[in-house]
Each structure stands twice: as structure tokens, then as C-alpha cells.
């Protein structure tokens, strides 16, 4: 369900008030049902499927004989309570039921995005208990913590605020509406069609007032003009015929599958495909992925030939400039380039590889010390390599599946150690390196854990972790990369940063007269050792021995201990999304038997601990 769909179902629920909570049921693994009593003996069942849907339903299996603990908790606090209000947060996939009982108002917050969640809160929005406890970078969904709503979405803006939002958005208008305004692709295209706005028009150039009027008209229609329309693969709140009562809720109830009865999930698992079939499916999916990549490379080469003069000029100018300027200076100059100039096509700069990423309809990497023909040759070679992989995968599908031998002995999971609450990694030669996650940890590392023979390391940018090397190491390049990557340089989208190292005796909290040293900051006096243009990159992998663990840090240190790993660079995806992507890739790399032993270790929280602050992209192998 989209936020627009949720707006319509919430509107229909509001028309049923007043309501009283009768009972709560939980159907594993992901369905919650709140039985509600209305006036004149009305009975309603509000179904919430985690991360997917919420609507009234008339199709319930026999409830479990032993209620789940979360259902019992909700019964204790909410049974007999009156639903005072039902509201949606903008057009985001979040809604709240305010339930009054014995002079207290409880807030039941339901999140339908990502994996979904149901959170019971007290009157001041202190979390009593969530269905899924979770610790994110920007907030904690844990008992005793305050529930934090996301920032308001643009559907709630005034006309002036909406104009300012579009003026500052660098995407085309359809993406700005789909992602920035949270309309999703279908409704974003609908708004463009209604206002006769080309979908690829820059958002800043669009008629913000016309789009705002059409957006408000859509919001009004999906609230007060509900006429459900059932399609083959969708159920929409408008476009069909008007009907009495909660018509869109009924349409959704018919559209979605029924709640599986207890025991059905196990039965389905028993009927699942055989191991050989699953392997064949994975092989076919791999071939399809390789073929898509090969076609993309072929298409990119064609676009490069079409943009031959522009790309040649970019390579010529950057090759000359990089021999007399630093890459950080070049990057600053590129950002000031006017529209229409070749430099305006440059999306990002990678100082480590002396390359730039250019948008020519597809994003392509240009190595500025190579000719354009040499750059194109690299893509030809990559396509050939993929074609060889496709041929090898097809040959593998023709061979019989050989069962992998089971591990003879279980490897224990990594024990919790004192340094795990900091950022940490072990260098290739085995030296422990620690980094602070915030100002408080920076203070603690220096005051409590830094000793005479350690090294103090810090990125030469604002907002960086204090890094302490516990002992001596021959791999200070790894330490420098660790310090650079967990700094404000990553959040700013830079691909390199300068880093310096000093002895503990040079680090002080005592300022000069008239100066002030803030919490988490320090004064370093005397000569420092600098590491210039340190490339930003973080690897996250799975260590299989001597303990099972998720580990992270510089690529050489991680690859020395993990057979399976993923490399990140500064990019576009938020930390939580990046952690989920990395988790999927790592699980895909591991075999079935290895995954069994890693269930308690390999999860989003463990991976997220090593994702740098700011946007990230996954480096293709």
C-alpha cells in the first residue's frame, strides 16, 4: 500500500468513530488484528500486515490458542479503551490510533514502510513496547525511548514552502514527486500528466503552483471522493464507482490474500522447491543479472560514442589540470561549472583512481590519464568478461548438483567484547584500532583508553572520529583510511581526505587563553605525520573462523579475515538502506549450510554498525 492508499483507508476508518477496542490477535509471522466495536452493535476487524498493508477485514482464521506476548501486552493496555482519534502522518506510511482508557491516552503507532512495525506508546510518546525492537542510526525503537516521527513530507507544505522545495531539488520532476513528495511512481506520473509537465523536466523548472494545486486536488479526492477501482495487479482508491461504507477497505480485503491459518506456513515450507530447484533458480537469476549488466555496458559504449566530443574534452582538460592542481581543488571548480558546460556532466570525482563519473544518459567512469578509446576498451573487456561468465553459468546448469558436505563442527559466534561499542577493526598485522561514534565516545577514548605507546589519528576535516591505535602497526595506511572513512568527508560525498597522526603526549584538552575546546574535541600541539588524499572506502564482511562475526574496516584488513565481503564508497543510499543491501548481498554469497550457523550473527543491526555516516554506494566486484 502507498501513502495515498493509506490516506483513503484512514478516511474511511474515521467515518466509523466512535470505536472501542475489544480484543487483539496476533497471527504469526506478520499479521496483527484489532477487533473493534462500534455503535449499534457494529463489529470491525482492523488487519495490519507488517510492512505491507492495513485495512478492515472480514476473513479471519481461528485465532491461536496461546496468544503471542505482544498481543497480550496490547490487550492489557488497550482492551475496553475508546479510539479517540485515527490519523495519518502526512502521506507517509505511518498512522496513529489514540486510545483513551482510565484517564490515560495511549498512542498505537503503525509503520508500514520497510519491514514495518507496531509501537505502543504512552501519552508523551515514550515507547512502552514495539513489536520489533530496533536500533537505527537516527533513532532507537526500544522500550523506554521516545518515539521520533520522521520530518514532515512536502504534501503538508504551504504553497511557498512547496515552491522552495521544488526549486532546491536537483532531480527531474517525476523523481522529485515520486521520492521527495513520497507519491510513488504511479501518482507522480499522474500529477505530471494532469499538469502537462514533461517527466524529465528539472524539478526547479516546473510550474510549482500548478503541481501544488493538482497535488492538493488528488489528496482531496482520495479522502472525500473514494471510488475503488480493482485492476489486475493493483487496487486503487479512485477511478471506479462510489459505494456506501468503507468501500476501499472492502476492495483491499478482496484484493489481498487471506491471513494464513496457523500451521499453513509450515505446510507451505514443506511444499517448497527441492534444493536442486532452488540452486537452478539462483543460477538462472545470476545469468539474468549478468546479461542485464552486459547489455548496460553495450548501451553505455554506444552513448560514449554519441558523446565523443564532450568526453574527449573532459579527459583533455582534467588530465592537464590534475598535473598542477589537487583533486579537491578540481572538485570545487567542477561544482561551480555553469549549465551546459562539459563539466556540468560530471557527477562525482574519485581522486584515488584519477577518475570522474559522468552522466551521459548512463553513468560512466572516465579515467582522465587514459584516452577515450582506452576508456571504451575497458568497457568492452568488462562486457567480454561477463559474456564468459554467462557461458560458464550456462555450462554449470547442465551439470548435476553435488551436495555440499556439512561442517563437522559448529563455529562459535563472536563473544561481546568491551571495544564493540566503539567503531573498531584489527589491522592486517593484528593491531586493535578504535574510533569514537560521537563526541562522548571521542572524550572517553582519549581520557580512558589512550596510553603512552598508542597513536592518536584524526581526519583533517570537521566532524571526524577520534581514532586510537592500540600499539604499533606496519599498516598505518589502513588506520588512515579508517579515520578518513568515518569522518565528515564521507557524509559530504568526498572520495578522499587528509589524515594526520600524533603521539598521546601531543593531545590536550587545555586551550590557549581566550580559546574554548568543545566536548569531543582536542588540541594537538607539535609536529604531526600527515597522510594525504587518503581514499575513502569501507569493507563489510563475514568472518567464519575462529569466531562467526560481521566485521568491517579497510578492505585489506577485512579481506584478510573474511572470505565474503562487500565494499562501500561514498554515494547516494542512506545508511539503513545500505545496511539492508549489504545484508542481502552477503546472504547471497554464503551457502545454505553457512547461513544456518550465522542466523544469530548476520543481521541488519550488526551490518549497520560498520556503515559510515552519510550516503553510500556498493562497489561492483
Image: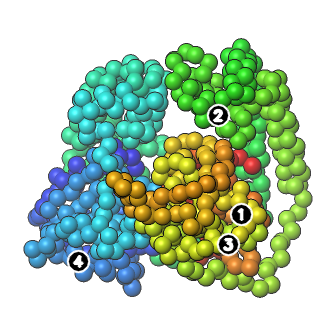
Marker disc for residue 77? 4
**Tag count in the figure?**
4
Q: CA distance from mark 2 to mark 1?
A: 28 Å
Q: Residue at x 22, y 54 (%)?
A: 87
Q: Earlier in the sequence, mark 2 or mark 1?
A: 2
Query: Mark 3: which secondary structure?
Result: loop
Query: Mark 4 or 2 closer to N-term?
Result: 4
Cβ atoms at labels 2 and 1 below 8 Å apart: no
Indicate the quadrant where residue 123 lies.
Answer: bottom left
Q: Please, what secondary structure does the residue beneath circle 4 have?
A: helix
* Residue 11, x across and y down, in percent: 22, 49
- Residue contact between numbered discs 3 and 4, judged by CB atoms under 8 Å: no
- Crowding near the residue tagged with mark 1, few <14, some 14–19, many ≥20 C-alpha atoms within 10 Å: many
* Residue drawn 60% across the image and 22% down it: 343
SS category of the residue bearing label 2: helix
**Foreground: disc 4 or disc 2:** 2
Query: On the image, numbered disc 2 is attached to which residue?
Result: 327
Q: Is residue 24 visible?
A: no
What residue did someone put label 3 on? Answer: 471
Whole-angstrom CA distance, mark 4 to mark 2, is 60 Å
Q: Is residue 29 above or below residue 491?
A: below
Query: Does 274 sit left or right of 448 as displayed?
Result: right
Image point 65% across, 33% down: which residue?
A: 326
Amino acid at each position: 500500500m502507498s501513502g495515498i492508499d493509506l490516506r483513503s483507508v484512514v478516511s474511511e476508518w474515521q467515518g466509523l468513530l466512535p470505536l472501542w477496542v475489544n480484543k487483539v490477535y496476533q497471527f504469526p509471522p506478520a499479521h496483527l488484528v484489532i477487533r473493534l466495536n462500534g455503535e449499534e452493535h457494529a463489529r470491525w476487524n482492523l488487519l495490519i500486515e507488517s510492512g505491507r498493508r492495513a485495512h478492515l477485514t472480514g476473513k479471519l482464521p481461528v485465532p491461536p490458542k496461546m496468544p503471542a506476548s505482544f498481543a497480550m501486552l496490547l490487550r492489557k493496555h488497550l482492551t475496553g479503551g475508546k479510539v479517540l482519534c485515527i490519523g495519518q502522518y502526512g502521506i507517509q506510511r505511518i498512522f496513529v490510533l489514540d486510545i483513551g482508557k482510565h484517564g490515560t491516552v495511549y498512542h498505537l503507532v503503525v509503520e508500514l514502510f520497510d519491514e514495518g512495525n507496531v509501537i505502543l506508546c504512552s501519552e508523551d510518546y515514550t515507547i512502552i513496547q514495539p513489536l520489533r525492537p530496533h536500533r537505527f542510526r537516527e533513532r532507537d525503537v526500544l522500550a523506554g525511548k521516545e518515539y521520533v516521527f520522521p520530518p514532515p513530507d512536502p504534501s503538508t507544505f504551504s504553497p511557498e514552502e512547496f515552491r522552495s522545495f521544488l526549486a532546491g531539488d536537483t532531480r527531474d520532476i517525476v523523481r522529485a514527486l515520486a521520492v521527495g513528495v513520497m507519491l510513488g511512481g504511479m501518482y507522480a506520473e499522474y500529477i505530471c500528466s494532469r499538469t502537462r509537465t514533461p517527466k524529465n523536466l528539472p524539478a526547479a523548472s516546473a510550474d510549482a503552483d500548478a503541481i501544488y494545486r493538482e497535488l492538493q486536488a488528488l489528496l482531496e479526492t482520495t479522502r472525500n471522493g473514494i471510488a475503488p477501482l480493482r485492476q489486475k495487479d493493483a487496487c486503487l482508491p479512485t477511478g471506479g464507482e462510489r459505494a456506501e461504507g468503507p468501500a476501499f477497505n472492502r476492495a483491499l480485503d478482496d484484493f489481498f490474500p487471506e491471513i494464513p491459518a496457523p500451521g499453513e506456513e509450515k505446510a507451505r515450507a514443506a511444499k517448497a522447491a527441492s534444493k536442486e530447484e532452488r540452486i537452478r533458480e539462483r543460477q538462472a537469476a545470476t545469468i539474468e543479472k549478468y546479461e542485464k549488466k552486459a547489455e548496460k555496458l553495450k548501451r553505455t559504449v554506444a552513448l560514449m560514442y554519441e558523446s565523443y566530443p564532450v568526453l574527449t574534452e573532459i579527459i583533455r582538460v582534467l588530465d592537464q589540470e590534475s598535473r598542477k592542481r589537487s583533486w579537491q581543488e578540481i572538485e570545487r571548480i567542477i561544482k561551480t561549472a555553469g549549465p551546459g558546460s562539459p563539466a556540468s556532466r560530471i557527477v562525482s570525482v574519485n581522486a584515488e583512481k584519477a577518475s570522474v563519473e559522468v552522466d551521459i544518459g548512463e553513468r560512466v567512469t572516465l579515467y582522465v590519464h587514459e584516452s577515450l578509446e582506452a576508456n571504451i576498451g575497458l568497457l568492452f573487456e568488462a562486457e567480454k568478461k561477463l559474456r564468459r561468465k554467462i557461458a560458464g553459468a550456462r555450462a554449470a546448469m547442465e551439470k548435476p548438483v553435488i551436495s555440499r558436505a556439512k561442517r563437522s563442527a559448529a563455529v562459535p559466534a563472536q563473544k561481546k567484547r568491551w571495544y564493540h561499542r566503539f567503531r573498531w577493526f584489527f589491522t592486517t598485522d593484528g593491531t586493535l584500532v578504535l574510533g569514537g561514534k560521537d563526541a562522548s565516545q571521542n572524550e572517553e577514548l582519549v581520557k580512558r583508553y589512550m596510553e603512552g605507546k598508542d597513536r592518536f589519528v584524526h581526519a583533517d576535516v570537521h566532524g571526524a572520529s577520534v581514532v586510537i591505535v592500540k600499539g604499533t602497526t606496519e599498516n598505518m595506511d589502513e588506520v588512515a583510511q579508517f579515520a578518513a572513512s568515518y569522518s565528515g568527508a564521507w557524509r559530504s560525498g568526498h572520495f578522499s581526505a587528509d589524515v594526520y597522526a600524533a603521539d598521546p603526549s601531543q593531545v590536550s584538552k587545555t586551550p590557549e587563553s581566550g580559546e574554548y575546546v568543545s566536548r569531543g574535541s582536542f588540541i594537538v600541539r607539535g609536529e604531526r605525520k600527515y597522510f594525504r588524499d587518503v581514499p575513502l572506502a569501507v569493507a563489510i564482511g563475514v568472518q567464519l573462523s575462529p569466531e562467526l562475526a560481521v566485521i568491517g574496516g579497510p578492505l585489506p584488513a577485512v579481506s584478510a579475515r573474511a572470505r565474503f565481503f562487500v565494499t562501500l564508497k561514498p554515494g547516494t543510499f542512506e545508511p539503513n538502506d545500505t545496511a539492508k543491501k549489504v545484508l542481502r548481498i552477503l546472504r547471497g554469497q554464503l551457502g545454505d549450510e553457512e547461513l544456518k550457523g550465522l542466523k544469530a550473527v548476520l543481521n541488519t543491526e550488526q551490518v549497520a554498525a560498520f556503515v559510515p555516516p552519510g550516503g553510500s554506494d556498493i562497489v561492483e566486484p
